[in-house]
Every structure is written in structure tokens, then in C-alpha cells.
Image (cartoon, helix red, strand yellow):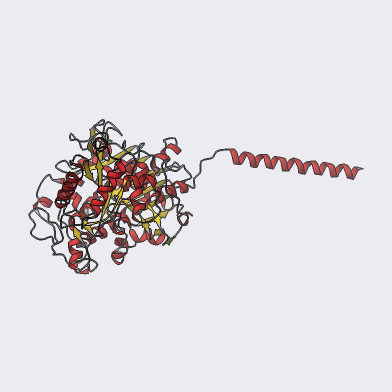
Amino acid sequence: MKNYAYFVTFLLLIFCLKVDAQRKQKNKKTTPVETTDAPKLVVGIIVDQMRYDYLTRFWNHYGSDGFRRLAEQGFNAKNHHFNYAPTSTGPGHTSVYTGASPSSHGIIGNNWYDKEKDASVYCASDDSYNSVGTTSDAGKMSPHRMLTTTITDQLRLHTQMRGKTIAIALKDRGAVLPGGHTANAAYWFEGDDVGKWITSSYYMNTLPKWVDDFNASGKIQSYKKAWTTLKDINLYVESGVDNNNYEGLFETETTPTFPHSTPNLLNKTKDFEIIKYTPWGNSLTTDFALEALEKESLGTDNVTDFLAISYSSTDYIGHKFGVNSKEVQDAYLRLDLDLARLLNALDTKVGAGKYTVFLTADHGAINVPAYLKGQKIPAGYLDWKETKTKLNEFLTYTYGTTDLIKNISNNQVFLDTKVVANLDMDLDEVQEEIAQELLSYDDMDKTYTGYQMWQNEYTKGIPYILQNGWHQKRSGDILFVPKPAHISYPRMGSTHGSPMIYDTHVPLLFYGNGIKKGSTVNRTEIPDIAPTVAAMLGIAFPNGTTGKPILEVLD
């Protein structure tokens, strides 16, 4: 009997210990705790007009601490593409940060025709706000035309606005759109005769002291200097000859050759716009980003902050000198040094392994068509004067008026629906007739109608890319695609904007906290970036997200 009592007591003790353990485990699961596993800082880097092959073409010239560090110690998505057109700066930056395409987020170009206002609008302009840091209108900007949230917005919301977002770029749209609707600050560079970092009253009423101090430090003026090559120019065998007919000139230059040391680079006390067209614009951006990192105390606690950086000078240089130029090659070798400076500073100030970086581009670029033609590759330039003349003749002959068309921009035709209605015609019929007429022109490759975009769901090829860039309320009635390597642009320098692969294929590198080491050749798309970062952070996706997390990236 005594042994039985001991046995019952023992069973009761075991039962009580088990219940207590279950209670503690339950409490442990339901009690909120602040995690320290998340990165202290996310750094998003967009390199304006960076084709994917700039990573591979110049690989042997890069040092170990910039592009190669990101690619070799991080994750390289080698088959990364824009899934929409037009491939330009405003839509590009927005799509990276919203996880969506223009069909959802509404930024359908840098500029576009607003059908309601009957006027052209700029993607970031907003006259309801004032410039801060300048007396010009260059600061009258906001993200109000962006219809969805960004990954930076979602991080701010997730942290109850405790996490900071700072966005920086030479271009206003390169800062305003990545910063999202809730950024603590977005700064951009006003060149011309001002030469200062500025912002908008959307974010603040006066510049912080550290920004004023930076503007007054003389650092900006120091970049008004000659541009010589980083290495012996004879080593730049990955690009074309220095003196050719495919590149633009700086003021007073007679040849587009190194060194670039004309008076507007050296002697003028103002004219800061020139900095944008040299690698010094990227160095200045890095300087300012590092100052923001320190003065804004980014990444110094367990609440994740976000630093969005866009390097714009590569776009200015590409437009002026072209894809195959020595200038583009030198710009990327010097950008490699700036990336190394940035990563080393992050190691010191935030801590190695405590931050996450992604690097991508807002679009690619075409090789100069005049150069391609010289290499017997099909290429050419659109004659818009002739196209408009022929189109007006068709409209007059078919409809008795040219008033049907209100605007042609971003490779889209906008019709006047009131005129179409007065002609007692169906809109879809008029769209199709004009599309067929445009398709008959020599330089055109494909045309589609708004009715087709509305009625169908394309899953591959050019129509898929066009549909992702077509917004039901904002886009045009007819979409046209010129032949491959045919552009509307001067005969010197490169441009972008098409749905062709040279404009869609760009790099995507992930590095740091929460990122696996490796690579993939599976197709990934620009809208996949934001949900990948969101999944890594454990936060909600941007509210217009159409992309999906890249599973291979996440640790």
C-alpha cells in the first residue's frame, strides 16, 4: 500500500512538470520578442542603364571588394529581366521597389500624356510642394503618381515608422520613387549653376544641418576636374576605339577622346551639370550616401533601416558615349571602387553580416545603331517626320480629319475618344485600323491595340512585356514596336526603352544577411526583387506586388 502511494505521487509529479512545461512553451510562442536575426540595414542599389554584360565584360578589371565581392560572396541572378516596356528610369526604379509592373503601379514612363489633364506629366513632379535647399522649382517633387506601396513603405509600416528610409540619387526620380510614400528623406542633386543636394517639402521644411554642411564643404566643387582613365587606356580592350563617330562631345571638344579636360570641366565656377556626365557623379553620390549613413545613424539598432541609392552617372555617360565606349568602361571600373568604399564603410559602421545589399539596374541599353550597321548588323533610325506625314495622310483619307490623335509618346498612340464617337465608329475598330497602318511602315515590327491589351492575358513574348507596361487608365490606344536595333535618337550615344532583350537584361546581385551564396540561370524578373526582400525581412509584400520571392536567394 505504501509503495502504491509512492507510485501515485510520482505520477502526479510527472504530470505537473509536463503541464508546467507545456504552459511555459505556450507562453514562449505567444509572447512577442524583438528579433536580432534581421539585418540592421538594407541597402538597395540601382545602377542606371547597367546592362548585364557590363558585369561580365569588365570582370577581369574589377577589384575584389566591389562587383566581384557581391557576385562571388553573394547571389547572382544571371537571367534577370524587365517584364515590361517602356524600359526607362521612372518605371524601372518604381518596379524594383513596388514588386509590380507599370500596369499596377501606374508609373508608365518618365513622362507621359495624361488623358484627364490633356497634358504631359512628369513621373515625380508635384506643384503642391515646394523646393527645399534651392530657390528653383527642382524640388517640387513627390511620389503621388505612384499608385502602390514600396518595400520601403512596408518596412516603415511594419516597424511602426521606427525604421528609417533615406533615398539618394543624382536624379530626382531615382530618389523619390524608391523612397516610397513614407520616406524620412529623399535627396537629389541639382546641377546647373546650383551644385547642391536638395529635397522637397513633401519630406521636410528645411535641410538637416549635415546636408547644409556637406553642400558647403567644397566636396562638390572638387569634382569639377578632368576625366582621365583609371588604368592605361590600352588595357581597355573590352571596348571600341577611343576616337570614333559614334560618341558625343563635351563643349569645345573636337574629338570624343580622353582626357576630357575642356573648360566646362575645369574653369567654370558654376555649371555643375557636367559632374553628372562623368564618373565623379557616382563618387559624389557615394560620398553623400556615406554621410547619410553616419549622420542619420542608419543600422545602429535592431530596427531595420533602409538606404536606397541610385547611381545615375552611368546613364548620362551611356547616353552620351554609347555602350561600346572607353568612357562607359572607365565609368564602371571607377564605380567598382565606389562600391568597395560603400561596402567597407558598411562593414565598419553597421557590421559585417549585419546588413543586406541588393544591386540591379533600371534598364539596359542598345549598342549605337550606327556602329552596328558598320558591323553589318541590321540596325537603323526611325524617321518620325516621315512617319507622322504618312500617318496624317492616312487619317485624312480614311476619317477626313487628323484630330483623332491627341498624342504620340512612349511608343503609344492616344486617341480622342470624343472624335471617334462623333464619327460613329467603334473605338476598337479605329484602334485596329491605325495599328494596321503603322504596321505597314518599314521601320515597324509589331503593333497592338488597347482592345487587345484589355481582352487578352499574354504570358510570353513581346505582347506579355507590353501588357505588363500597359495601364488601363493611363496608357494609350495603340502600341507599336520598331524593328530590333531601330531607335528614335541622335546617331551618337545609346538609349533604351524598348521591350527588346538588350533593354531588359540587367544584373541582380544579393549579398549579406539572410542571403545564400550561389547563382541561377533560371529566369527572374524585376518585380521579384521586392517580395524577395520582404520574405527575407518577414514583412508584408508591397500592396501591388505581382512578382514572387526568388527562393534560391534566401538563406
Please state the horizontal and vertical placement of residue 247, each as a whole percent of the image. Answer: 15, 59
Residue nearest the viewer, comparing 64 with 172: 172
Residue found 70% across the figure and 40% down from its top:
20
Left or right, residue 52 beside residue 193: right
Please state the horizontal and vertical placement of residue 193, each as a whole percent of the image. Answer: 14, 42
Residue nearest the viewer, comparing 303 with 102: 102
Quadrant in the picture for residue 161: top left
Please state the horizontal and vertical placement of residue 34, each as a whole percent of the image. Answer: 51, 41
Outermost residue toward the right? 1
Residue nearest the viewer, comparing 241 with 406: 406
Residue found 21% across the figure and 55% down from its top:
441
The quadrant of the rendering that contains the N terminus is: top right
Left or right, residue 272 beside residue 207: left
Q: Is residue 285 visible?
A: no
Quadrant in the picture for residue 487: bottom left
Q: Is residue 192 visible?
A: yes
Please state the horizontal and vertical placement of residue 64, each as a whole percent of the image. Answer: 34, 62
Up the image or down, 169 lies above or below 522; here it is: above
